[in-house]
Image (tube, rainbow, N blue to C red):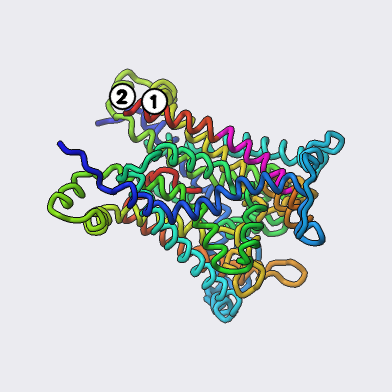
């Protein structure tokens, strides 16, 4: 059989060029530009806005200055805060809750299933500004729904955003993003042939045993994919800014919010770019792991 | 099939647990069911004595707020058109042509798109847009979103096109069609559902986003609804709750209806990496 190509190399290149131009200009050029800017003292306003000077590693040295590293509002504080935020809200919160939900949904009656699934998905699809405001109202000290519930249970109301801002954004982000893990695990569970479980039913296995001994080993690949993806997204998320503005007194200033403040509030582009480079390096580490796993998976199925 | 007592019990406790989690997820949004229709709404959960559309009328009369929705629409549609067309062409090329180095192009794209996130790239994106003289224009927002969403859009579509047998186009070409005709008249109609998914996904992403327009735009007349919503704060910084609630509901409406549309048309299952 003659193997002719559907699209000549030239036509292929032509088809590819609009996307290449856009991705080149707004993904690939920024990658190199941010590295370049991070070695300058560029500012948004003033003399160094037009004629930035090359300052070598000064911005990085300032970021990693150990005498202030762990102080609130400094780079190190934000970095550690972000790591805690990712561990708690993505890995524990979203992945675990998503997994539990997906498992429960396999054997709940339709109406309960539709209701709970919709509630989780709506939290995920609504615009972030709307979500931010909804939570602002939800957590309001005097009238908020949460304090209304808490007092009706006979407990003391709390000024959550002031007293426990970090835990607020952890719960907030768990709530916001659990849908992704739930849907991913849901489709993973439904791809397991029902006969596997029927055999276990006959043997009288409990739901937890079926989960642990049959389902979990079969969806291991999905779990890894899920963990890497939500880690990367959560690491870069900006949405908590809309609830807390990074405050009170920098206590919820994640790296993305820190970058924004340094670059666009303090107008220090060079320093902001240096933070950007560190974020990209961390992203790169996750992306390489992810791509390696994805490659192995493709080999396995091919 | 009869269930044993134990199985019944576990089934009931599963349902109860699922329902409790569902309710917990719904709680923060419960307020939105009532406040927009309550002319005296405050931050507390309260079933209005009279359901009224008064808040919506006030929002409709607010030119700046309505302008915000129009701007969101302009930016989303602009971005979606760019993403839709260029992702379809590029994905088709990746799937069907034999451009040398296809594999490494894909790998590099995937790598860059996951490394360059909004939070890492906000400084250079701002600088590129300002050196192009595009700060404070719709086109700036449209271009940046198109570039950012394209890699994911391309991969979703490439997977989709890979799933279509090549023999469709091959038989058209054997019958004398040019490769352009085979693409336009044979492949495109088959790919259409994939394009719809990508378009909806891109629209929802741009419509809901805050950071990019917040950084790239300055003038009130260009602000999308995500930024314009902050005009419903009094001088002292306290929100005008009634109007905010009504506006937020109007602003969420397209997203919810698109979700329902996709759910009805395709079933809301997994299409690759759904969200950026």
Q: Are marks 1 and 2 in contact (CB under 8 Å)?
A: yes
Q: Is residue A40 left or right of residue A234?
A: right
Give the letter of the chain under mark 2.
A
Q: Is residue B184 left or right of residue B119?
A: left
Q: CA distance from mark 1 to mark 2?
A: 11 Å
B165 lies above or below B71: above
Residue A196 badge: 2
SS at mark 1 in the image = helix
Please report the residue visible at 53 percent of the width from the left and 30 percent of the height from the top.
Answer: A289
Residue toward you, A284 or A155? A284
SS at mark 2 in the image = helix
Please report the residue visible at 67 percent of the width from the left and 44 percent of the height from the top.
Answer: A35
Report x, y in % for residue B268.
37, 49
Q: Nearer the viewer, mark 1 or mark 2?
A: 1
Name the image quarter holding the N terminus of chain B.
Answer: top left
Whether residue B214 is visible, yes or no, is no
B69 lies above or below B129: below
Whether residue B82 is visible, yes or no, is yes
Taken as a whole, is the magenta stretch helix, strand or loop? helix
Report x, y in % for residue B264.
33, 56
Instruction: Please check the rendered image and state whether residue A49 is part of the magenta-colored stretch, yes or no.
Output: no
Indicate the quadrant where residue B257 lies. bottom left
Q: Earlier in the sequence, mark 1 or mark 2?
A: 2
Q: Residue furthest right?
A: A67
Report x, y in % for residue A82.
68, 39
The residue at which mark 1 appears reads as A218
Give the letter of the chain under mark 1.
A
Please report the residue visible at 52 percent of the width from the left and 44 percent of the height from the top.
Answer: B113
Residues indicated by labels 1 and 2 sit on the same polypeptide chain: yes
Residues shaded magenta: A272-286
């Amino acid at each position: 059989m003659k193997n002719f190509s559907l699209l000549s190399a030239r036509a292929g290149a032509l088809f590819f060029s609009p996307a290449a131009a856009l991705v080149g200009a707004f993904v690939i050029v920024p990658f190199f530009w941010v590295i370049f800017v991070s070695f300058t003292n560029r500012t948004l306003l003033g003399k160094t806005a037009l004629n930035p000077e090359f300052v070598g590693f000064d911005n990085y040295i300032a970021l990693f200055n150990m005498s202030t590293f762990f102080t609130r509002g400094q780079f190190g504080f934000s970095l550690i805060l972000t790591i805690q935020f990712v561990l708690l809200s993505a890995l524990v919160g979203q992945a675990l809750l998503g997994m539990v939900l997906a498992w429960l949904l396999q054997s709940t009656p339709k109406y309960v299933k539709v209701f709970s699934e919709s509630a989780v998905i709506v939290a995920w699809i609504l615009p972030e500004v709307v979500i931010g405001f909804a939570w602002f109202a939800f957590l309001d000290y005097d009238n908020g729904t949460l304090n209304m519930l808490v007092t009706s249970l006979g407990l003391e109301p709390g000024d959550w955003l002031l007293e426990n801002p970090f835990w607020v954004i952890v719960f907030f982000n768990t709530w916001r993003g659990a849908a992704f893990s739930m849907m991913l695990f849901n489709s993973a569970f439904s791809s397991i042939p029902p006969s596997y479980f029927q055999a276990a039913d006959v043997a009288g296995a409990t739901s937890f045993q079926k989960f642990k001994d049959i389902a979990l080993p079969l969806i291991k690949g999905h779990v890894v994919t899920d963990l890497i993806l939500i880690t990367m997204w959560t690491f870069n998320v900006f949405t908590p800014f809309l609830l807390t503005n990074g405050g009170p007194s920098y206590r919820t200033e994640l790296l993305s919010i820190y970058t924004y403040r340094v670059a666009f509030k303090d107008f220090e582009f060079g320093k902001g770019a240096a933070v950007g480079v560190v974020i990209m390096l961390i992203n790169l580490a996750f992306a390489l792991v992810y791509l390696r796993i994805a490659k192995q998976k493709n080999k396995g199925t091919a | 099939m009869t269930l044993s007592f134990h199985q019944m019990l576990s089934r009931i406790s599963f349902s109860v647990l699922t329902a409790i989690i569902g309710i917990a997820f719904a709680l923060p949004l419960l307020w939105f069911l009532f406040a927009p229709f309550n002319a005296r709404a405050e931050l507390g959960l309260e079933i209005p004595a009279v359901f009224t559309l008064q808040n919506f009328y006030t929002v409709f009369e607010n030119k700046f707020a309505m302008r915000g929705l129009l701007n969101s629409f302009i930016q989303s549609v602009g971005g979606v058109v760019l993403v839709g067309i260029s992702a379809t062409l590029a994905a088709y090329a990746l799937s069907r042509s034999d451009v040398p180095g296809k594999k490494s192009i894909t790998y590099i794209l995937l790598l860059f798109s996951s490394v360059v996130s909004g939070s890492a790239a906000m400084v250079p994106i701002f600088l590129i847009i300002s050196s192009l003289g595009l700060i404070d224009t719709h086109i700036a927002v449209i271009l940046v979103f198109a570039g950012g969403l394209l890699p994911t859009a391309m991969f979703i579509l490439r997977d989709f096109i890979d799933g279509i047998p090549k023999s469709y186009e091959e038989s058209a070409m054997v019958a004398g069609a040019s490769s352009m005709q085979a693409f336009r008249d044979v492949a495109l109609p088959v790919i259409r559902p994939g394009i719809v998914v990508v378009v909806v996904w891109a629209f929802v992403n741009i419509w809901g986003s805050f950071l990019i327009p917040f950084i790239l735009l300055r003038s009130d007349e260009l602000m999308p609804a995500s930024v314009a919503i902050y005009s419903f704060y009094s001088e002292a910084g306290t929100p005008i709750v009634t109007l905010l609630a009504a506006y937020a509901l109007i602003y969420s409406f397209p997203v919810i209806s698109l979700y329902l549309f996709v759910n009805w048309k395709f079933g809301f299952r997994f299409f690759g990496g759904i969200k950026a």
